Amino acid sequence: MVGFIFRRFFQLVILLFGISFLVFSSMYLAPGDPASMIGGPTASKEDVEAIRDNLGLDDPFLTQYGRYVVDLVQGDLGYSYQNQQSVAEAIGVRLPNTLKLAIASMIVAIVIGILTGLISALKQNSWLDVGATTFALAGISIPNFWMGAVLILIFSVNLQILPVGGLSSPWYTVEGVKELILPAITLGTGAAAMIARMTRSSMLEVVRADYVRTARAKGVKEREVIWIHTLKNAMIPVLTVIGVNFGSLLGGTIITEKVFAINGVGRLMIDAIAARDFPMVQGSVLLVATLFVVVNLVVDVVYTYIDPRIKYQ
Amino acid sequence: MGEALLEVKNMITEFRTADGYLPAVRDVSFSLNKGETLCIVGESGCGKSITSLSIIGLLPSNGRIASGEIKFEGEAIQSHTSEQMRQIRGNQISMIFQEPMTALNPVLTIGYQLREPLMIHEKLSKKEAHKKGIDLLKSVGIPYPEKRMNQYPHELSGGMRQRVMIAIALSCNPGLLIADEPTTALDVTIQAQILDLINDLKQEYHMGVIMVTHDMGVVAEVADRVMVMYAGKKVEEGTVEEIFNHPKHPYTIGLLNSVPDVDKPDFELEAIPGSLPSLNQQIHGCRFHERCKFAKETCKQQEPPAFDLSHSHSVSCWLEAEEVINQ
């Protein structure tokens, strides 16, 4: 198991190089000149030229990328083109907000998703099932930004029971939890819907399994038939969906942070793209990629606890 | 003749389908004594498994016992609530299934699955149940039982898993063991071991055993009495000698003729032509007449009642009617 985790981290390093190369080249090829963005509309041609020279933007592509990688392996993510701030520092300040949002959304997604899936599987073809399936379809179809805006309209503007945006209080206070509710629902609903659908179909498959019939033949109470004999088996494919959805959820933070005015990595990234702030974009993308890989590694490790047939050497 | 353990009278089991309720078991009656093995034989889909699932109350959600009576140790259980049936299952009536590879839960240890019925029905503590579990594994011939308790099903072979299933089924000393094709999925050598094991344990615990099978070799090995089913109906019933030496129903004869015999190299395998009618097929008269080479006009008109040939042998076939009347 330790060897397996070690190997996965080695893979992560290779993966990050690949990602950094892709992001670097797409930023290089993208239209727009960071030097003139930095200089602003009033800068003279000479000023822009000086900035470009200063940042090494005239060097050949591979020289620029090589310089970036050499810094990167030394743990240096570079400095922002816009304000000379350290990229690592800028991300470090905003990461807690993004993590809070992502974790809260994942909790919303997992709790709502599994419960909805369970109910609709156990009451198959009832109106509860129809309702849950409809919810799941709607959850997948409704775009983030629209749902966020509607939630704000209902709960913040009309009912005035939840704040409009921002994450300023610590998460363990009542205020902090209140601030997280709307963004977490906005971001988590899509994943909840996916998890609900997978839970439903997986449960429906497992309740027909021979070993569930065996449990009933032993006289096991119905509650335990569901919670012990069925659920644990049904969770194996659901876990995969949870891991994969975490990726799209991280992508979703970009929009959700914008809608709810949360100062997080997603917003940092979108602002940096608009400003052609290459080091900042690079740094945030690498961070998101690392998070995604680590979460899926955790999922792989959790597999071994749920399913004894899975063993990593 | 021992005392009656199980009596099934005029049982009809139906399934809800798109075409309405269709009977899969049609008016079947039989009984079983303590310490006796009854084999229910017939082709796949003839209702033999459904008969056994009806007794233990494990019909699929679209199935129901429409009428009839099931008496277990003198008590009618067909209208028991699901909670009453749960207390009987695994305790007084146990069942083992065809597919040992999938019948055990892959994510729970053998020990957990073995302790469960002991803790539910006998109210043993986890520690006591663990100890008894080890004894049970020993009694079904599993080596290193202490080690097995902590293993998962995928670490055991098919034969071993079926032994575990038997240990689970027998954990609470049931009066009745229902075995639904327990050896069909196993190697021939393992088959014989499992059948011997069931036979030995039957004697040790003085259980009644209902063995559902389509394998006449298994029947010859373990049965005291045999019930032959065709398309949801009982067509013949008798002691194992009566069925093998004096089969009366053309379907029983067909089943016996479709077993190869190594001692007689000239013996021609004789398949029964046609196939089992589907549930929703309307058949007038005897349900077998379309596949029966002896079918007469009466067979197409009227369903044959059961004719008693001896106190243990009965057959539902018009061909036997004249003989019985003549006697």
Image: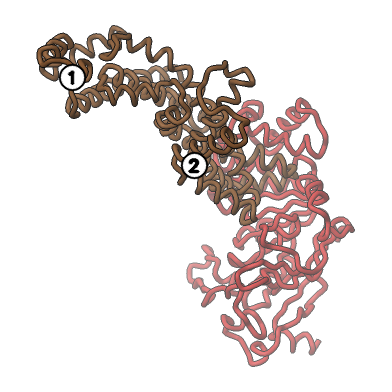
Viewport quadrant of the C terminus of chain B = bottom right
Query: Picture coordinates of residue B198 (x, y %)?
Result: 70, 48
Query: Picture coordinates of residue A277 (x, y %)?
Result: 26, 19
Query: Picture coordinates of residue A258 (x, y %)?
Result: 42, 28
Left or right of A280? Residue A244 is right
Are the numbered discs 2 and 1 placed on the same chain, yes or no? Answer: yes
Left or right of B106? Residue B26 is right
Query: Picture coordinates of residue A96 (x, y %)?
Result: 48, 17
Q: Which chain is red?
A: B
The chain carrying label 2 is A
Using the rendered image of the protein, determine whether residue B193 is visible from the camera's viewpoint.
Answer: no
**C-alpha gap between disc 2 and disc 1:** 44 Å
Q: Residues within 10 Å of mark 1 (few under 14, many from 20)?
A: some
Instruction: Name, please, the residue furthest toward the front.
Output: A42
Report the residue marked by disc 2: A194
> What is the total number of numbered labels drawn onto the structure image?
2
Q: Which chain is brown?
A: A
- Identified at 18% across, 17% down, the residue is A42
Report the residue marked by disc 1: A36
The chain carrying label 1 is A
Q: Secondary structure at mark 2?
A: helix
B312 in relation to A155, above or below? below
